[in-house]
Image (cartoon, rainbow, N blue to C red):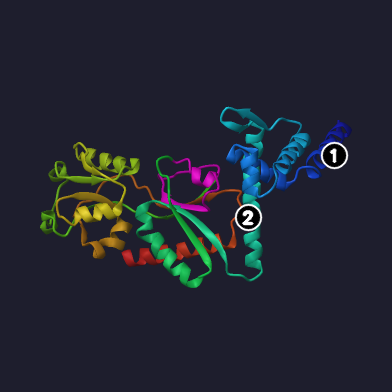
């Protein structure tokens, strides 16, 4: 049996060398991805500034090396077969790792350059992440930070899975775990009931939730916020308030709160960073809801560039400073 296993291993090694190692080229794989993206060999050739025959030859080389058909023609143009889809899914990871490798080389060569791609909810972009980027850019002026809004409608972390971002900073359920993700809890960030300084509720020393049920509320379209309000009001035997305005835009909420008519809920961190500028105040009410802390989430088994490591370290430092100010 040992001889048979050794023979199988040798055959697998030989198969890799002859079919893949010597014949499959990164250039051909890149051409395939462009053809699939544009749905046409002619368009792909124009995009790559090469001839259609070069594109056709690259696809033929891949099909010959792999022994499968990679492209089908349809009324909508060229479409990938299941084999091409499987190959490109893995190929995407290969190119991503190569990009990270180049960034590593730049860092090792002494160039303080690179980029960090961050996804976060808007309330963090309006507070903690802005604070972190301000300090980070002063220390590392040649590292570019790209910030996009995190998709928090589910906990699938698709932006990470698709390698669109390097890390997400977002709210997660307590004790959340995922086999594909590294999760580092930064801090608890409870929600507060917030009004503008013109609100008649500002002068009240004591407020009960029951008094606020029928007030005009601004509620973001977030399942997390809806769950927090539902849990907090039901704990008092009340129905959660209906929204008069539904929006995720913090700027719009702040303008409406300034009229003095509306109430909303904001994370404590967002309030601390924006209370003075927008004349906001938290009402003396504690929402009894299950904590959902803020965390750094990134992919396991993915190479993290030096620039990303530097940013994560700086974000930890910024968070510690914020928590010291909060006490």
**Residue 168 magenta:** yes
User: Residue at label 1?
Assistant: 14
Residue furthest to the right: 3
Across and down, in percent, residue 305 comes to: 59, 59
The magenta-colored residue range is: 155-180
Comparing 205 with 168, the one in front is 168
Residue 327 visible in the shown view? no
In this view of the protein, can residue 102 be seen by the observer? Answer: yes
**N-term-proximal mark, 1 vs 2:** 1
The picture places residue 48, in percent across and down from the top left corner, at 65, 48
- Residue 261 % position (x, y): 14, 51
Left or right relative to 12: residue 81 = left
Image quadrant holding the N terminus, namely top right
Labels 1 and 2 touching (C-beta < 8 A) = no
Who's the residue at 44% across and 53% down the image?
148
Crowd rating for badge 2 (residues with CA inside 10 Å; few <14, some 14–19, many 20+): few
The answer to which of 287 and 106 lies nearer the viewer is 106
Name the element at disc 2: helix
**Which quadrant, please, contains the C terminus?**
bottom left
């Amino acid at each position: 049996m040992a001889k048979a296993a050794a023979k199988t291993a040798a055959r697998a090694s030989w198969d890799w060398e002859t079919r893949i190692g010597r014949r499959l080229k990164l250039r051909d794989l890149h051409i395939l991805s462009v053809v699939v993206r544009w749905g046409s060999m002619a368009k792909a050739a124009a995009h790559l500034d090469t001839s259609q025959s070069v594109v056709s030859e690259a696809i033929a080389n891949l099909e010959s090396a792999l022994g499968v058909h990679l492209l089908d023609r349809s009324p909508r143009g060229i479409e990938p077969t299941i084999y091409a889809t499987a190959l490109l899914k893995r190929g995407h990871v290969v190119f991503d790792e190569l990009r990270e490798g180049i960034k590593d080389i730049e860092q090792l060569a002494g160039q303080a350059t690179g980029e960090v791609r961050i996804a976060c909810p808007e309330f963090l972009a309006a507070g903690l992440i802005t604070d972190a980027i301000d300090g980070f850019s002063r220390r590392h002026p040649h590292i570019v930070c790209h910030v996009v809004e995190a998709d928090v409608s589910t906990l699938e972390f698709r932006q990470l899975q698709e390698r669109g971002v390097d890390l997400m900073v977002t709210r997660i359920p307590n004790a959340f775990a995922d086999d594909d993700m590294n999760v580092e809890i930064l801090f608890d960030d409870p929600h507060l009931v917030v009004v503008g300084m013109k609100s008649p509720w500002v002068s009240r020393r004591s407020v009960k939730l029951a008094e606020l049920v029928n007030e005009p509320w601004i509620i973001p379209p977030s399942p997390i916020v809806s769950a927090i309000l539902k849990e907090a009001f039901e704990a008092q035997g009340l129905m959660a308030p209906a929204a008069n305005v539904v929006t995720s835009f913090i700027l719009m909420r702040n303008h409406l709160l300034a009229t003095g008519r509306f109430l909303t809920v904001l994370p404590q961190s967002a309030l601390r960073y924006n209370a003075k500028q927008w004349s906001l105040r938290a009402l003396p009410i504690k929402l009894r809801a299950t904590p959902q802390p803020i965390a750094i989430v990134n992919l396991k088994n993915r190479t993290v560039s030096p620039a990303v490591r530097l940013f994560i370290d700086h974000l930890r430092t910024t968070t510690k400073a914020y928590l010291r100010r909060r006490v």
